[in-house]
Amino acid sequence: HQTQFGSNLPRINLVSFPRSGNSWVRYLIEAATGILTNSVYKEPSMKEYFGFVGENEPTDSGRCIVTKTHTSSFVDVSLELRREKYPDNVPVILLIRNPANSIISLWNLVNANGQGNSYFYNVSNDSYQTNEFHKSVEENIRRWETVVSDRLIWTHRLLVIVYEELVAAPMEGLKAMLKFLGVPLDSQRAKCLTKHLQGPAKGAQRQ
């Protein structure tokens, strides 16, 4: 089944802390709807490794069904600026993963140091005993809480998807997302997708 750009689509953000399954969810949504997704980051690796053709599409083009963002995951920003950049009236699918797993997976990613495909890299056990790791945990716990609480408190129209529940029952979670997006589930696409649920991105959610 092919995927293509849509037209006149509303802006809907797919929000998560890094390493929470955002790219896997993008794959599921694209496969189920046939409509491309994009990202605020425009990362070349997303197209190279995972085949996200819409990665570089402008976020205001109205041609992508959801837009990937980690909001304030990487820097500490005031609440006023966070709400200005991510307005309360923009609908959100909020993807939540166990923060311990997300934070450890992020540590692996940022410490790959060019070791092949960094999305699949695992650091040594000694790395977890360093002061740098302990500091990163403290920072990222705070930022994880900010990403999640901002959306729970301020977003007017919100769908929460728990990563662990999605892994256990992917089609049920996908149906909830499609209902939120206002897109019916095509039976032929669903049949095909049930045979290819993992996609290229899910295995990259390292711990």
Image (tube, rainbow, N blue to C red):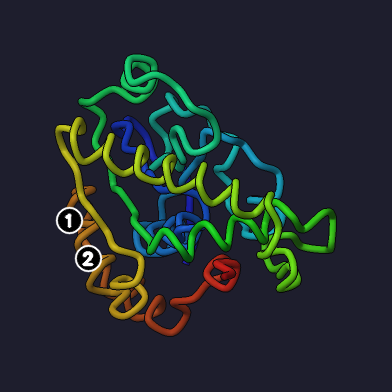
Image point 45% across, 32% down: which residue? Answer: 72
Picture quadrant where residue 106 is located: bottom right
Residue marked by disc 2 = 175
Q: Residue at x 17, y 56 (%)?
A: 179
Is 95 left or right of 183, judged from the image as shown?
right
Q: Are marks 2 and 1 in contact (CB under 8 Å)?
A: yes
| Residue 1 higher or lower than 151, as above or below | below
- How far across and how far down the image is residue 198, in percent? 49, 76
Amino acid at the residue labelled 1 = Lys
Query: Which residue is more in the foreground, 110 or 43?
Result: 110
Compared with residue 194, is residue 56 higher up or lower down, i.e. above or below? above
* Mark 2 residue crowding within 10 angstroms, few (<14) / some (14–19) / many (20+): some
Helix, strand or loop status at disc 1:
helix
- Tag 2's secondary structure? helix
Instruction: Please state if 196 lies on the left or on the right of 201 as rendered.
Output: left
The residue that label 1 is drawn on is 179
The disc placed on residue 142 is: none
Provide residue 108's location: percent of width, then percent of height: 67, 61
Quadrant of the image occupied by residue 48: bottom right
Q: Amino acid at mark 2?
A: Lys
- The count of marks equals 2
Q: Is residue 57 left or right of residue 117?
A: left
